[in-house]
Image (spheres, grey):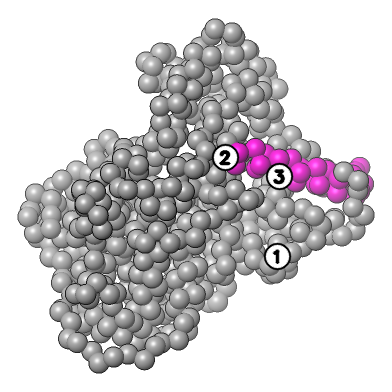
């Protein structure tokens, strides 16, 4: 490592510093990054036209007329819209990405609801066939070795660059997910990243029975520990934490961010506590060795695991076995269920799933013959001094968490009738097909369309995160209205279905090229706040509130591994839907809140299954039109 790299050893709150400011001689990663285009600011008139178009299927004609007047006012030459647009264009010239800092703050760091359920996604991995502690620890050791193997590619900058449609993608998120952690703050959180510089993290945190351990994963010569060495170390941890810790300190990370920030400052007043918390924050990642869950029938098993990944099952189960602010937490339970939960601020799902795909493949590799063992030091148990005040904070966090756990309704559905090969055989994008099935299911349940969010990757651009694919369109509404209409012929319905999938495809292409409307509108709104001008009426309008109230929040996260990502709804009366389309089946995870009488995850799964099957029958019974 050269001298300049050594200067960059301090952990910095990521998102407030450009990666190029690290004083590092550009390696492969930076050279690749610098060649990427900057995120464009879309033309103002184009966004306003598309905004009105997007509102048509979700608001009344009367509301639309009112909004058209506001848009006309906003778009006047020399008016407020033009001023804000110019501000955005100036910002785009001065920064690497005009959106990324704003997005990190507004979507994540200033969001005050608990990260559990409301922000952090979980991933359910296929059930492993071990059924005891030996198997659990052996698998965990192999998994840790796989993580370190991936980390080597990140450290050496040998991670293969990903492409989408022939274009190279921004790889920055991969460099943010290891050795990083979210830190609670009174109004805004921050993120620290210890992956850079000479004082790189050499340890992971292991949690068992609510107790945290610092486990060094490198030998003194810098080589990573082998599976056998890791297994012995994990066994030591297991044997010294046989009793469940009375005070599950990790529960504090499940609380509302403001309450947690107060408790955090309180906790860190004590020197021992501060050292323990810093050790967790600096670790490469966390590995949670969970207690087995109560046995359930096969059909609800996956849904139960999804809940475990999202929140740990509450204070009586495994929620104390977590540090939810840690970017990556791998979860391995004694009964073979496993997966992970990740703090969303540094990364989207695809880099996380690519890491998982790598690790899962790695765990299948045969063991190599090992050299004689050198005795390893005992992993260090992290101590916490619990004052009455901290105990009180833990109790309050437990109560709030248990309410959240009771409220979350999760259903994992494996749709076995067909996978992505069917829509492909019909020359239809599998993603568009699934999104339309969601539109049809929702329409049949509620009799109207709703604002729908599907995440689109902006990684074609430097530091790109996401924009919104608006799956509800004039075309999708026409199709879902026709589907159960006896006056329409099957051919008409099939044509409307094809037209709607085509419209979805077009919106997706527009979004990944930086021309969608959601982030642009957000940028104009944030520009108004920054310029201290009064908030334009356009953003105070009911239609804007309706457009931003996503009853369906969805994401396609494809993986090689037969897994599924899951996340909570983003509004109290909505659904969170994540799916992984495999060749011959589709994995869905659907969530809703029990406190809302109108939503039900199992009911949505039922309607979704029916929609997918009805759409297949429709296409198979009609010849392909010349659309």
Single out the residue that lies furthest toward the top. Answer: 78
Residue 121 in percent (x, y) is at 45, 55
Dot 1: element? loop
Question: Disc 2 to disc 1, how far (Cα)?
Answer: 24 Å
Q: Find out whether the residues at labels 2 and 1 contact each other: C-beta distance under 8 Å.
A: no
| 622 or 193: nearer the viewer | 193
How busy is the neighbourhood of tag 3: few (under 14 within 10 Å), some, or many (20 plus)? many
Residue drawn at the location 29% of the way across and 44% of the way down:
22
Left of 228 or right of it: where is 362? right
Residue under label 3, please give it. 505
On the question of residue 349 being in view, the answer is yes
Residue under label 1, please give it. 419
Range drawn in magenta: 484-513
Question: Disc 2 to disc 3, how far (Cα)?
Answer: 13 Å
Residue 305 in percent (x, y) is at 46, 68
Badge 2 or badge 1: first in the primary sequence: 1
Q: Find out whether the residues at labels 2 and 3 contact each other: C-beta distance under 8 Å.
A: no
């Amino acid at each position: 490592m050269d001298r300049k790299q050594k200067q960059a050893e301090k952990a910095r709150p990521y998102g407030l510093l450009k990666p190029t400011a690290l004083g590092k001689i550009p390696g492969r990663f930076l050279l690749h990054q610098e060649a990427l285009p900057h995120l464009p600011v879309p033309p103002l008139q184009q966004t306003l036209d598309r905004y009105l178009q997007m509102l048509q299927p979700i608001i009344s004609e009367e509301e639309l007329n009112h909004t058209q007047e506001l848009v006309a006012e906003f778009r006047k030459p020399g008016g407020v819209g033009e001023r804000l647009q110019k501000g955005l264009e100036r910002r785009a010239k001065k920064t690497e990405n005009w959106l990324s800092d704003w997005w990190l703050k507004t979507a994540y760091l200033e969001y005050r609801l608990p990260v559990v359920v409301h922000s952090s996604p979980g991933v359910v991995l296929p059930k492993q066939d071990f059924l005891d502690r030996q198997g659990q620890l052996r698998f965990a050791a192999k998994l840790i070795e796989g993580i370190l193997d991936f980390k080597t590619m990140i450290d050496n900058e040998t991670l293969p660059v990903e492409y989408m449609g022939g274009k190279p993608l921004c790889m920055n998120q991969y460099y943010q997910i290891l050795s990083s952690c979210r830190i609670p703050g009174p109004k805004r959180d921050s993120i620290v990243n210890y992956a850079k510089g000479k004082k790189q993290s050499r340890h992971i945190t292991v949690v068992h029975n609510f107790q945290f351990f610092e486990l060094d994963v490198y030998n003194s010569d810098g080589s990573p520990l082998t599976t056998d060495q890791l297994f012995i170390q994990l066994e030591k941890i297991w044997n010294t934490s046989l009793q469940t810790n009375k005070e599950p300190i990790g529960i504090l990370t499940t609380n509302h961010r403001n309450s947690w920030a107060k408790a955090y400052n309180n906790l860190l007043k004590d020197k021992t506590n501060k050292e323990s918390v810093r050790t967790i924050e600096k670790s490469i990642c966390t590995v949670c060795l969970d207690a087995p869950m109560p046995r359930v029938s096969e059909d609800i098993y996956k849904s139960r695991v999804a809940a475990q990944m999202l929140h740990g099952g509450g204070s009586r189960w495994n929620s104390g076995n977590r540090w939810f602010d840690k970017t990556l937490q791998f979860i391995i339970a004694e009964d073979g269920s496993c997966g992970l939960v990740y703090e969303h601020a540094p990364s989207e799902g695809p880099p996380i799933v690519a890491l998982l795909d790598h690790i899962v493949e790695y765990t299948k590799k045969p063991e190599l013959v090992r050299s004689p063992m050198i005795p390893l030091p005992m992993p260090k148990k992290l101590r916490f001094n619990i004052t009455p005040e901290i105990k009180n904070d833990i109790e309050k966090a437990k109560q709030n968490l248990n309410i959240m756990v009771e409220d979350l309704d999760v259903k994992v559905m494996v749709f076995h009738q067909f996978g992505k090969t069917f829509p492909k055989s019909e020359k239809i994008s599998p993603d568009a097909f699934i999104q339309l099935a969601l539109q049809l299911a929702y329409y049949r349940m509620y009799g109207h369309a709703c604002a729908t969010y599907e995440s689109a990757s902006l990684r074609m651009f430097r530091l790109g995160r996401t924009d919104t694919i608006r799956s509800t369109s004039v075309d999708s509404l026409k199709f879902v209205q026709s589907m159960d209409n006896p006056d329409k012929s099957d051919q008409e319905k099939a044509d409307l279905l094809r037209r709607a999938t085509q419209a979805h495809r077009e919106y997706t292409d527009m979004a990944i090229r930086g021309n969608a409307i959601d982030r642009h509108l957000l940028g104009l709104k944030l520009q108004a706040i920054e310029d201290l001008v009064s908030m334009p009426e356009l953003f105070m309008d009911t239609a804007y509130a309706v457009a931003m109230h996503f009853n369906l929040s969805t994401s396609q996260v494809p993986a090689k591994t037969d897994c599924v990502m899951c996340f909570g709804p983003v509004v109290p009366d909505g659904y969170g839907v994540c799916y992984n389309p495999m060749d011959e089946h589709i994995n869905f995870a659907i969530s809703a809140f029990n406190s809302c009488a109108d939503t039900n995850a199992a009911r949505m799964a039922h309607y979704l299954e029916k929609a997918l099957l009805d759409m297949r029958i429709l296409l198979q019974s009609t010849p392909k039109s010349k659309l």
